[in-house]
Amino acid sequence: MAKPNFFIVGAPKCGTTALSEYLKEHPNIYLSDPKEPHYFALDFEQYRLTKTWETYLDLFKDSSAKHTAIGEGSVFYLFSSVALKQIYQFAPQAKIIVMLRNPVDLVYSFHSQVIFTADENVKDFKRAWRLQGKRQQGIKIPRQCREAALLQYAALGRLGEQMERLFRIFPRQQVEIIWFEDFVQSTKQVYERVLDFLAVAPDNRQDFIRINENKSHKLGLVGNFSEKPPALLNDLALKARDLLGLERLYVLDTIRSINTKVASRQPLSDRLRAELTAEFESDIKKLSRLLDKDLSHWLLAKPTYI
């Protein structure tokens, strides 16, 4: 059976969805569908779409001999305390792709994402940020939240700490690092560099449309229903799918599409941005030393929102 030989491991809200969409159109690259099975994130059980070895490998069954690069892109592998080690035990020669951005912008954008997926119910980011201490104690966690650890925004944004763990497991030469700013500004060049890293031929792609922009629900109640349908309804839908012999039902996808709007978020206040920057400053400096990359602009620059 075909097995993945490369992994896009994170971080969330750094362009992984866009990169995956571009890569999967290359004739020599095969990416799993769904993109984020999170099979190796044993500590994030509710995010694991496949939980047995057989069903995980089944995600790659349609790959063929022409697909020399076979992969998946689960964005919480980098944050997970166990996933990278699990991946190494499975495929020690695997190539690892990491996408990174200013953690202040990352966590602010991620908050919008978990609001959209109904894992977070506090729409004001400042208040959600302040709740981290209580939530660490199991207090004020939304009933529909799949994984409380993902509401620990400060921990999610400590990329230096996460990269340090990655390099304790995988050799540096097996890791390709993509900076979000470069990906946005020079998408074609970054894409071609990734192709070279994966050892596949250039495909002369010229079109790179924007993917996975900041989203929100037009109607919150409808959004909550489509993201987290009642268990009974979900069970009935699964039975109907199996009865009809379909791979999936598209009713919820249609509801999501109609109820979704794309809009930029309001910038963080200068005061809150300064607070978050101070929170992440030491970790940013750790990342800078680890990757020999000047990241001082992350402590000063204006934000980017996608």
Image (tube, helix red, strand yellow):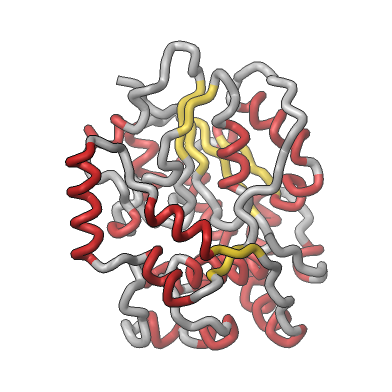
Left or right: 169, with 278 as reference point: left
| x then y, percent, for residue 150 | 43, 67
| x then y, percent, for residue 65 | 44, 11
Q: Is residue 267 above or below residue 232?
A: below
Residue 196 figure quarter = top right
Q: Is residue 192 above or below residue 41?
A: above
Residue at 67% in and 44% down: 178
Q: Is residue 163 or residue 198 the one in the foreground?
A: 198
Placement of the C terminus among the 4 image quadrants: bottom right
| x then y, percent, for residue 267 | 73, 76
Left or right: 199, with 204 as reference point: left
Residue 273 figure quarter = bottom right
Q: How many marks?
A: 0
Residue at 39% in and 64% down: 226
Q: Is residue 163 or residue 19 the one in the foreground?
A: 19
Residue at 71% in and 79% down: 268
Q: Is residue 78 or residue 139 the one in the foreground?
A: 139
Q: Is residue 144 above or below residue 177?
A: below
| x then y, percent, for residue 42 | 29, 52
Left or right: 189, with 11 as reference point: right
Placement of the N terminus among the 4 image quadrants: top left
Left or right: 36, with 129 as reference point: left
Q: Is residue 218 or residue 154 the one in the foreground?
A: 218
Residue lying furthest top in this view? Answer: 65
Residue 188 figure quarter = top right
Residue at 44% in and 75% down: 120
